[in-house]
Image (spheres, helix red, strand yellow):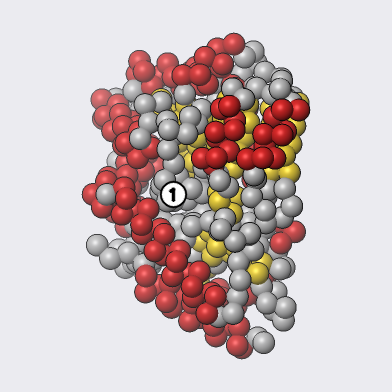
Amino acid sequence: MPLVIYDTRIKGALNLKLFSVGPVACRPEVLEEMSKQMFSHRSEEYKKLHRETVNRLKELLETKNKVFLFPSSGSGIMESSVRNCVEKKMLCCINGNFGRRYADVGAANGKIVERVEMEPGKPITPEILDEKLRSNPDVEAVSITYNETSIGLLNPLQELAEVVKNHGKLLLVDAVSAMGGVEIMIDDWSIDVCFASSQKCFGVPPGLAVASVSEEALEKSKQVTERGWYFDLQLYEYYDREKDSTAMTPPIPQISALNKSLELMEEDGKKSQFELYSKRNDKIISGIKKLGLSTFPEEGYESPTVACINAPEKISGVKIYEKMREKGFELALGYGQLKKTTFRIGNMGYIRFEDIDSMLQALGEVLSENS
Ligand SMILES: Cc1ncc(COP(=O)(O)O)c(C=O)c1O
C-alpha cells in the first residue's frame, strides 16, 4: 500500500500535500472507518472496539498500565493529569509553548506552579531538573513535554524520568506529537501519565486523545479533592474496567479510525513504524541542509516528527509558508515569537518518500525565486 497524501479514494481531498504538524493527512483505510454506521457506546459492538483499541495501544506502548480513551483533544488530558495528580504544587519543564501550556493549565486549576525554563532551542537537562527538585521537595508531580512541537525539539525523556523518579515524584508526559512516531517505554521509564492526540503520529482525525495511567497516579487521584467530573480518572478507570466503555459518549468514528491505524502499524511491525519516521526525517533534514538551511534546536535534540527550520535572512518563515502553499504544499508556520524567523515541516501521518522529494524541490524553488 503506497503512502500518498492526496488520493482519488479520499472524498474532498485537498490539492495539497500535507507536511503539517496536526491535523495531518490520514490513510484512506483509516478515513473509510469513519464513514461506517454508528452504534451505541453501550453495545457489544462498541465494547469489542473499545477493548481492541485499548489492547493495541498497550501493545504499542509496551505497558501494563491502564490505557484510557478520552473524548477530547490532548489538552483535555493535560488538564485531567493536573486535576488528578496534583493537590497543591507541581513542577513544569518548559522549553516551548506546549510546556508553557502545561504550566498555564496548572495555574488555571489553582495549583502552585514551579517552573524549569530553558533558553529557546535548548533541551531540559537532567542536572537542572535535579537541582530544581532539590530546592522544591514539596512538588507532587513533574510535567515534561517529550516532543516540543513549537520548536521541533525532543527532550531527553529517559534521563529526565530517572531524575523525577529518584526524587519520588509522579511523572506526567505530554507525548502529543511523539506517541506512535517515536519509541516511548512507559513502564521502563516509570511514566505515570503519558498522553497523545489522535491527529498527530496516529494519522487519525482530531477529537480523540489517549493516555496511559499508572497505579500510583490512580492512587494519588483517589486522595485528591476537587478532581471535577469530566476528566476524573476514577471515572475512566471504572467505566473501562466494568463496562469496556467511557462514562460519556465517546467519538466512535475516531476510535474506529485509531483502531485501524494501530492495526496497520501492527501489520508493518512497531519497529518499522519508528524506522519509517526516522528515515523520512533523515530525508527531510539532509534535504534542507543541502538547500543551505539549518534547524532551530540545539544539535542532537532535533525532533524526528517536526523539523523547525531557521528561515534565511532574505525571506521570512511566513513567506516561505505562503509560497509553499501556492506550490501545493502545506508546511507549518513558526510558532509564537518564532513566526517570522522559522518555519516547520511536519513528518507525521500519511507521507510517502517521493512527496518529500517533491516538497524539497519546491522549497528549493521558493528559496531561489525569493533570494
Ligand atoms: C506537544 C503538544 N502538546 C499539546 C498539544 C495540544 O494538543 P491538542 O490540540 O490535541 O489539545 C499539541 C498540539 O499541537 C502539541 O503539539
Is residue 148 at least partly visible in the picture?
yes
Q: Three-letter amino acid code at disc 1?
A: Val
Image position of 131 with respect to 18: above or below: above
Residue at 75%, 59% in the rendered image: 337
Residue 12 vertical position relative to residue 111 in the rendered view, above or below: below
Picture coordinates of residue 364 (x, y %)?
Answer: 54, 83
Q: Position of residue 193 (x, y in %)?
A: 51, 30
Residue 335 in the figure: left or right of residue 280: right
For residue 99, say whether it is visible: no
Q: Is residue 315 left or right of residue 360?
A: right
- Residues 183 and 1: in front is 183
Q: Would the CB of label 1 be found within 8 Å of ligand 1? A: no
- Identified at 71% across, 62% down, the residue is 338
Residue 108 location (% of width, % of height): 73, 31
Give the residue pinned by disc 1.
Answer: 182
Q: Residue at x 36, y 57 (%)?
A: 275
